[in-house]
Structure formats: C-alpha cells, structure tokens
Image (cartoon, rainbow, N blue to C red):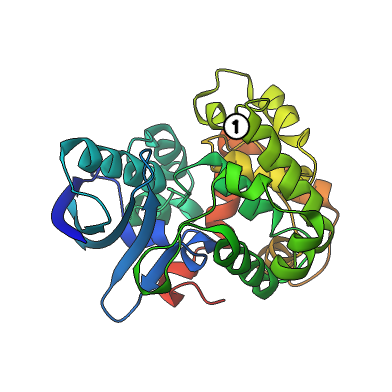
Amino acid sequence: MFSAHSTLSTPHDFDFWRTVYSHGWCALPPFWVDKVRGALSRLLLLEDGSLASCTLSDGKGRLSVQIQSTAKLDKVRKDEIKRQLVECLRLGEDLSAFYAAAKRHPRYRWIPASGAGRLLRAPTVFEDAVKMICTTNCSWSLTEIMVANLIASVGKKFADGLRAFPTPEATAGLSDSFVRKHVRAGYRSPYIIELAERVASGKLDIESWRRSALPTDELFRLVRSVKGIGDYAAGNLLKLLGRYDYLGLDSWVRARFYELHKNGRRVADKTIERHYSRFGKWRGLFFWMEMTRRWADQKFPF
C-alpha cells in the first residue's frame, strides 16, 4: 500500500459540509462520512485499474486529502485523483449567477451566505445513473441495500473489505436473476444491466452528458430515454449534470413542500412547479436547497 497527502483548493463560495450533506450520495458507498473525525472518504477507481482511498477534511480555503493507494502515487495518479475529487465536489462549477439570483430573494439569501448550492456527485455519470435508478419507487433504506449489494457483488476489492463502485463492464456481465436475488434490485435489474451493457459497448456515451452542449430540454429527453429513468430520476440526474431546469418530484419532496408552503395540505404537482417557475433555469436548485436546508445541521438525517 502506498500513502500520500495532498490538498485541494476550494472556491471562496464553497462550503465543504453543505456540499457533503447536499443529498444522499454521502451515505452511499463508496462514499463514507466519519462524523466523529469530521471527514468524507471516497474509494476511487483510477483509469489504470488501481484503487485510491481518499479521506477529505476541511481547512481554510482548501481541503486536506489523505490518500492510500494500491499503486505508487506518482504525478499522473495524483493528478487523476484530484480531477475525480473536483468532479465529485463540483469545485469547478460557477454558481455566481445562482447566488446573485438568491440574493434578490430574502427567503433564499441563506444559500450564498452559507456556501450551499453544490450537490455531491460520483466521479462518473454511470455511477450517478445507477444510483438514481436505485432510488426509484422505494424507501431510502432499500436504496442503501441495493447499492451496497451491487458493490459487494462486483466492485473491485480494496483493503479492509472496501470495494469500488463497479465498472459498466463488470455490471454488464451480471444476469438478471443474479441482480434480482443478490442485489435485490427487483424490476430495476434489467434496466441496470441494459444501461451497463450500452455504456460498456460504447453505444451510449453517458460520460459526455456532463459536457454536453445540448439544450436542457433535449438533454432531458436523452436521459429520459434510458430505460428505468423516468421524469423524477431524469430531473434529479440533470441536477448532477449542472442543469437545474427540472424539479424531480418524489413523495418525500412533495411532503416537504406541503409542510413548508401549504401547512401540510396536498396540492397538485403543477402547483409546486408554478411556485418555482420564477427562478427560471435555476428553479430545480432553489427547490432542492429549500427542501434540504436542514440536512447540513442534522448531518443527513436518514
């Protein structure tokens, strides 16, 4: 095992814990949060097949990164590790227009003031997409079970029983019966396998989505065309691609909206959509920030 220490510079408007607790990915391996030590860990699979376990802790204007790897940590591997972590934490994303919009609304001025706004994501769109499929039509606890089981089944092994998120190639090799029985993915099983097969074969260039120049409505339709990804999953996956035009409604956020704005009274989805329409292309991010504002203080309460 090889060890090294590194640092990551962070933007002036970045808050580490607001980003970590921005949504549930922090609770899904191969992310882990150590609430006692105040650190986020992530097991990365590098392009050459080596593994690197990274433990990040917050500092002034930078993050401290402790690295353990199965391969020598030369400049090429260190640079790739940094690139992957920058992707996960969205350190290169410019949210200045979003913050300017938030400052115009007293109810939302807490967002730029607290450094909220960046949503934690995986190093790859493939991982984000599989995890998003695993959030559909189920409880959060079942999502945790499915993701953990998939990683345990075909994720590349590191030390201490840790495993990386499976590659498309490894996932594509699974049978529907295996995924149903051992991952417990139910009806999602063929969708996960088909997605992996399309990505592994090169028929679907899913990683290009983060850099896509397509208008957001066209990108939404492209994401939505993947079997197993409906309106909810597509809207939320778009947020992880840096597109915030869609709300991505599910039962939890509906209930939260009813609580915050309607004294618990149920309303139609179009009423929720209309409430945030004034925020234009940022409406999905305003919506998500409001729904999850308390998560950072509660250290992700699920």
- What residue is rendered at 34% in x and 64% in y? 41
Q: Which residue bears the numbered disc 1?
A: 206
Can residue 197 be spotted in the picture?
yes
> Considering the numbered disc 1 on the image, is that residue within a helix, a strand or a loop?
helix
250 left or right of 42 in image: right
Residue nearest the viewer, comparing 6 with 272: 6
Q: Quadrant of residue 280?
A: top right
Q: Position of residue 12 (x, y in %)?
A: 23, 44
Q: Quadrant of residue 162?
A: bottom left
Q: Quadrant of residue 151?
A: bottom right
- What residue is rendered at 54% in x and 63% in y? 24
Residue nearest the viewer, comparing 298 with 150: 150
Residue nearest the viewer, comparing 86 with 189: 189
Q: Position of residue 158 (x, y in %)?
A: 38, 63
222 left or right of 51 in image: right
Number of labels in the image equals 1
Can residue 61 be spotted in the picture?
no
- What residue is rendered at 55% in x and 22% in y? 212
- Pick out the residue farthest to the bottom: 36
298 left or right of 138 in image: left
Residue nearest the viewer, comparing 170 with 66: 170
- For the C terminus, the image quarter is bottom right
Q: Residues within 10 Å of mark 1 (few under 14, many from 20)?
A: some
- For the N terminus, the image quarter is bottom left
Q: Position of residue 116 (x, y in %)?
A: 40, 53
- What residue is rendered at 51% in x and 31% in y? 210
Q: Amino acid at mark 1?
A: Ile
Q: Position of residue 73 (x, y in %)?
A: 18, 47
